[in-house]
Every structure is written in C-alpha cells, then in structure tokens.
Image: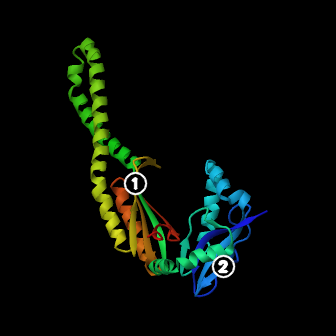
Amino acid sequence: MANGTYVYCLIASARRPALNGIPRGLPRTGPVRLLDVDRGLTIAVADAPLSRYGERAIERGLSDLDWVSRAAVAHEAVIESFIDATAVLPMKLFTIFTSDARALDHVRADEARIRALVKRVANQHEWSVRIVLDRSAVDQGRRTGDQGRRTGDQGRRTGDQGRRTGDQGRRAGDQGPMAGLSYLARKKARRDAATELRERARETVAEVYDRLAARARLARRRSATELPMGDGPLLLDAAFLVPRSRTAAFRALATREARSLARRGYGLTLIGPWPPYSFVQD
C-alpha cells in the first residue's frame, strides 16, 4: 500500500523534541516522527496511506463531517503536544506530500518566511477570548423591573380597595383590559432591557479588547456572529498572542474583566493556551 508523508507542524527548538507521550495522530497513520530541516527546525510527520489520505480520498471524506471532525481533533492533539517548544507552526489539516523528500524540499524552499514566523511567535502562546450577551442577566433585570412594577401595582390596589367594592360588575368587566395592559408593559420592559445591553455592547466589547490587547504581543478579532453561543449572541471572538512571561498577568486581567462584565450582563470566557493557530498566516 502506497504511503504519503502527512505533516502536522514545524517545530523550532534548540534541542530535538522528544516523542514520548505524543498522541497517536490521525486514524490509520503511522507513529509521529521527526524530519530534520536545519538549525533547530524539525517537521512532525507520519506515514499516511494514500488510499485514505490521498487527494481523491480526502475529497470524498470532506462530505462526512464526523470523519473530518475526528481527523481535526487528532491533528490538533499532535500539534498541541509540542506546545512547550520554542515555537510551533501548525500546518493545515490534511497537509500531505508524496514523500519525506518532497516535504523537506517544500519547507526549505520557504525557509526564510518560516524563520520570520518563528521569530514572530517564539516563546508565546495563543489565548482565545469570547464575550457573549448574558441572557440570564437580562432576564434578571426584567424580573427586577417587573417586581418594582408589581410593588407599585400593589400600592395602587390597596388605595383602590374602596372603589373596587363599589361596582362588582364593572370590576369584572375591567379585569381583561387591565391584565392586557400589564402584559404589554412587561413585554416592553423586556425589549428595553435587551436593547440597552445591545446598544452598549459595541463600546463595552471594544474597551475590553483594547485592554487585553495591551497585554499581548499581537491580537486579532475574528468575525463574531449573532448566532446564539450558549446563553446569548457572540459579541467578541478574539485571539491574543501572549508572551509566556506575561501569562499570569494576562489571565489575571481576563479574570477581572470577566467579573466586571458579569455585573453588566455579559459573559467572558478565556480558553488556552494554544499553539499560535491564528498568527502563522502572513
């Protein structure tokens, strides 16, 4: 059976990386091994059967989302196992060459650009930050507003007690309209609370992004979407390249921002560290 050379990542390290504990990699591929490029630069590769990972096989497999997902998880697990190296340059999923020699030739032909990327990301990790509109906080605000209106309504009901004892028929006839007005008032209050959060969101998120970016080497905003993410719409999806020496300070700042945002109706999630997936493209 013919094999190709599947490439996971490039690794810059003063010492040749150890392969102890490296994950198995993509299904039906061989063990992860290293190819030496030059001067502390290696490539993490594996033998891959072309019957499963050749061009035509991959084109067929792309229609199977479960197959693609399993491959992506295995691909990233291998890359992330080298996260403690000086620098890791992830390769795209399904990067495969016909032989070790072709893989080495490709890297050496692009070595100047690769060295520049290594310099950019050396001794740094990627951290992901997402901010969502916290619907539970909006709902709490609605309930607080509703409670205040109910308290006011109770006072009015007490003051109206004498009048209500006057005409039973008229009171029964008015119950429907009053209930309808109360429902409409509550519905409007809900809309107002949600609108207020949305109108503040752009400014709030921009301020948080700027403060986090100031603690990072590089920062990039990915396109957020209004599709629901957990409890609310995604307002910020950003990646930060953080020097390892600043990791503790960056995480502490993110924690403080998360607490502050939670009081204002937002949720912040910090995920990482990762290899610099978002910072190896020109």
Quarter of the image for residue 216 reads: bottom left
Question: Are the residues at dot 2 and dot 1 in contact (C-beta closer than 8 Å)?
Answer: no
Please name the residue shown 58% across and 74% down the image. 106
Q: Quadrant of residue 167?
A: top left
Name the residue beneath numbered marker 2: 35
Tag 1: amino acid: Ala
Quadrant in which the C terminus is drawn: bottom left
**In the image shown, does 55 or 28 lie closer to the viewer?**
55
Crowd rating for badge 2 (residues with CA inside 10 Å; few <14, some 14–19, many 20+): some
User: Alpha-carbon neighbours of circle 1 within 10 Å: few (<14), some, or many (≥20)?
Assistant: some
In the rendered image, residue 178, in percent from the top left (x then y), is placed at: 27, 24
Extreme right residue here?
A: 1
Amino acid at dot 2: Leu
The residue positioned 76% from the left and 64% from the top of the image is 2
Determine whether the residue tagged by mark 1 lies in a helix, strand or loop.
loop
The residues bearing labels 2 and 1 have C-alpha atoms spaced at a distance of 38 Å
- Circle 1 sits on which residue? 224
Q: Position of residue 6 (x, y in %)?
A: 66, 67
Q: Quadrant of residue 161?
A: top left
Q: Quadrant of the N terminus?
A: bottom right
Out of 275 and 191, give the one closest to the viewer.
275
Which residue sits furthest top?
Answer: 169
| Element at label 2 | strand
* Sooner in the amino-acid sequence: mark 2 or mark 1: 2
